[in-house]
Image (tube, rainbow, N blue to C red):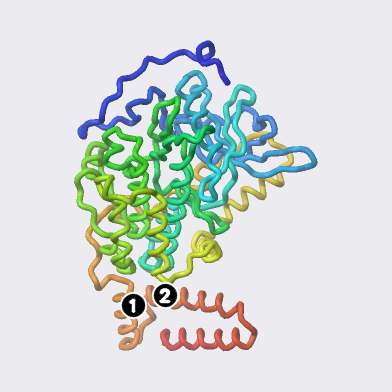
Amino acid sequence: MLDQQSKHPTIPARSVAKAPVSEIPPLRLDSTLPVARPSDIPDSLPATPQLGRYFLGYRLSKTGLGSTYLARMVSTGGFFKPVVIKLLRRELHEHIEGVNGFEDEARLAARLTHPNTSLLVDFGTIEDRRFIAMEHYPSIPLSRLSSFTSMTPVKLHSPTWVALACRGISDAAEGLHAAHGLTDDHGESLGVVHNDISPRCIAFGMDGTVKLQHFGNAHFRDRKSGYVREEHPRSLAYLSPEQLRGNYSDPRSDQWGLGVSLWEALTGRILFTAPTDAELQSKIETRPIPPPSRFNPAIPPFLDKIVLRTLSRDPNGRYKTARDLASALSSATRRLEVRTDPLTLSLWLQDHCGPDIRRQERLVRELADREDFEGVTEVDDAYDLPLPSSVSQEQMALTEPATAASTPEALLASSLAGAKTQDSDVPDLTLALLVQASARWLRIVSRRPPIVFASGLAMGVTITLLFST
């Protein structure tokens, strides 16, 4: 343990006050840690890519607190495995708050062993650099999946996506419940609250599992450091009303973040957005929240009730525990009568996130094949790419839903009617639906005996030709 009195200068304490609606600071008010924005951080990479038994291959992202790297952990006998290394910024080594915050994150991560949370591999100091090593978990964050599904109503209104989104939030709630229930060595509750839940914290894994990540800003008993708002541009939009007023210790606040994440995943829209933090806080505290079914006809009323309950501005109106929320979502998923098992999720990710998956796989292969580590390669946001350039946040902002004539069902009906009465090509949406249906049909029949495959192929071709002539 570091001698904080002798090695680190003290920083004057800052008084704690509740944030008024007119002024929301970029940092949480009980933090004295100077946090820079990523654009203000020099693009300097580590002078040497080796830290003890870890070889840094690719920098995945950088924040005001540090950088995250895809690395290779090596040991005797030719053993190695990919891990994710988080390094604290060099400047923050001179701040007690920075050191304490890093140790807080590691101490909490060491106790998290639930299947729906990320696992700690190692923590320590090598060559005067503090690091946290986490398991490498090939996955796609919910923030990325939402950008995919919002591109077309066909994906967004798919019952499969609705069910998988519910299953993902349910799994994240199970991981959250495990964190809320953590105890110390004497069996006393640690009082953990995540305090920073957003779609980027919910990872849909290639193996069909879902994990809740990023506990670096969690509240828990005996935490040494203050609470620092990460500088992700939209993380403020997922804080509950009571968190905006300075209360970070109520576990039910985390349900709000899950609720906003699920609402946006189901609708393809941003629930709370504003040009300034003050206006954003005002909207979070007062703006009426419409049911997600208003924007997505595939959502049944019983799912509306679950989402809106998690978004109750009164914490007493939410579920008693995160496990109660997980149970409600699991029941809703079963009522949707759509498969959401790990195999189904894994196949869905392969179908819809192919480029992202292949990029991650390529980085891991290249890391394994590298024989010399002369430098670190910059691949910022490799695992959390921004929205496509054709989709802006303004376009995704909360607006009135489209009319009935623009729903997929109505578009399909009008497209089929036009195809039957006019000598024109099949409209784009109809063709897209036919191609998608044909591809799924082929995947199904390809696993059957040859005679079934042949008959299925003939049927698919016949149906496509009927609609295209």
- The kind of residue on which mark 2 rests is Leu
Q: Which mark is residue 433?
A: 2
Please tell me which of labels 1 and 2 falls first in the chain: 1
Residue 47 badge: none
Residue 393 position in % (x across, y down): 33, 50
Instruction: Please state the horizontal and vertical placement of residue 164, each as a whole percent of the image.
Output: 44, 62
Q: Position of residue 220 (x, y in %)?
A: 43, 33
Q: Based on the displayed image, in which of its 4 quarters is residue 237 positioned?
A: top left
Left or right for 96, reference 453 = left
Mark 1 Cα within 10 Å, few/some/many (few <14, many 20+)?
Answer: some
Callout 1, which amino acid? Answer: Leu
Mark 1 lies on residue: 412
Q: Secondary structure at mark 2?
A: helix
Q: Is residue 332 above or below residue 56?
A: below
Please state which of residues 236 and 420 is positioned toward the viewer in this rendering. Answer: 236
Q: Residues within 10 Å of mark 2 (few under 14, many from 20)?
A: some
> At 52% from the left edge and 34% from the top edge, which residue is drawn?
67
Tell me: residue 6, above or below residue 171: above
Which quadrant: the C terminus?
bottom left
Q: Residue furthest right?
A: 77
Q: Is residue 320 left or right of residue 103?
A: left
- Looking at the picture, tell me which residue is in the foreground, 96 or 305: 305
Q: Quadrant of residue 22?
A: top left
Query: Where on the picture, by quarter, is residue 406?
Result: bottom left
- Residue at left offset 43%, top offset 58%: 148
Question: Going 43% across and 56% down the picture, which residue do you hit?
Answer: 170
